Image: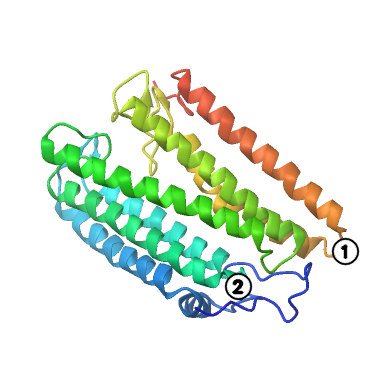
């Protein structure tokens, strides 16, 4: 795996290229080409999700079965998109690490790729069977599949702690704000993952009612009860939002001193994390994000 050269100078506070930005890759095609060259494992796992996403889209209009109030292929479609974004984001961020860390990056990449592929295949298998994948222990087979999926999600979480250690030990390429955006993004992502563990302890994501029923369009979050998925969603997407904010801070305030960059990204992270915490607390009270009678 080759280390990605993100800027003409790898100075400690040089402005990094942003994922998908015109300045860095010129086009989505070039971005994907660079990503594949830097991390073919996570890139390839992402393309497998693209294929599964296409399959779910094709099946959606021809299958009228419903699971927890939604079309049976809605959840596989949603998870395929989510996992795809995660895999390609992680591959891009890990490519910022120096050559000395890239052997470890390969191990992490293989573990994450296998974990995500196992998860998505279980989700698709359960959809094909006409049942739900998460929190389903209704039969021995369902319980085994849920357990396998949970085991690999735990592996993925452990690997992200390893990735965070690498990010703290080795300084990635980029400005202070961008580098700390990557590091803090991983930390908040792990907090969002812990909310997923809270769902497992509840054997569901709805607080105050059963999973399913009326939900927000496109998201499915309950409009009648508390739903832990909102906090989970915001926490996980810190992996994209915080590095992007760090990059934007450097791009639009290029003369900002190192201390100012650090203060800016830390302040934004505190605000973002407060939003995650509020959504989690709000859901635990059994209150929906948006109430519909």
Who is closer to the viewer here, 235 or 141?
141
The image quarter in which residue 136 lies: top left
Q: What's the mark number on residue 269? A: none
Q: Residue at x 25, y 49 (%)?
A: 123
Q: Is residue 244 above or below residue 97?
A: above
Left or right: 71, with 197 as reference point: left
Q: Are marks 2 and 1 in contact (CB under 8 Å)?
A: no
Mark nearer the N terminus (2 vs 1): 2
Colour setup of the view: rainbow
Cα distance between the residues tagged 2 and 1: 30 Å
Give the structural element (helix, strand or loop) at label 1.
Answer: loop
Q: Which residue is mark 1?
A: 255
Q: Give the percent coordinates (x, y) of residue 201.
A: 36, 27
Image quadrant occupied by the C terminus: top left
Query: Badge 2: how crowded within 10 Å, few (<14), some, or many (20+)?
Result: few
Q: Give the percent coordinates (x, y) of residue 254.
A: 83, 65
Q: Is residue 71 visible?
A: no
Q: Which residue is mark 2?
A: 100
Q: Is residue 102 visible?
A: yes
Give the structural element (helix, strand or loop) at label 2.
Answer: helix
Q: Residue at x 49, y 28 (%)?
A: 289
């Amino acid at each position: 795996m080759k280390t990605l050269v993100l800027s003409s100078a790898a100075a400690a506070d040089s402005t990094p290229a942003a994922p998908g930005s015109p300045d860095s890759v010129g086009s989505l095609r070039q971005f994907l080409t660079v990503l594949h060259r830097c991390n073919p494992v996570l890139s390839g796992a992402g393309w497998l999700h693209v294929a599964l996403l296409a399959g779910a889209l094709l099946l959606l209009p021809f299958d009228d079965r419903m699971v927890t109030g939604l079309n049976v292929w809605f959840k596989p479609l949603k998870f395929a998109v989510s996992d795809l974004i995660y895999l390609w984001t992680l591959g891009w961020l890990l490519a910022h690490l120096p050559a000395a860390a890239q052997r470890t990056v390969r191990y992490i990449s293989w573990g994450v790729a296998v974990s995500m592929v196992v998860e998505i295949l279980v989700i698709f298998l359960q959809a094909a069977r006409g049942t739900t994948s998460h929190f389903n222990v209704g039969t021995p087979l369902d319980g085994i599949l849920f357990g396998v999926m949970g085991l690999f999600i735990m592996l993925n979480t452990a690997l992200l702690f390893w990735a965070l250690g690498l990010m703290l030990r080795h300084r990635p390429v980029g400005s202070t704000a961008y580098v700390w955006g990557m590091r803090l993004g991983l930390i908040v992502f792990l907090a969002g993952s812990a909310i997923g563990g809270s769902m497992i302890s509840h054997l569901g994501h709805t607080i105050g009612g059963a999973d399913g029923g009326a939900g927000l369009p496109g998201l499915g979050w309950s409009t009648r009860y508390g739903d832990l998925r909102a906090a989970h969603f915001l926490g996980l997407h810190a992996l994209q939002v915080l590095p992007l904010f760090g990059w934007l801070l450097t791009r639009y305030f290029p003369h900002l001193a190192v201390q100012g960059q650090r203060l800016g990204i830390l302040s934004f992270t505190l605000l973002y994390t407060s939003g995650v915490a509020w959504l989690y607390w709000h859901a635990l009270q059994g209150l929906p994000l948006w109430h519909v009678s």
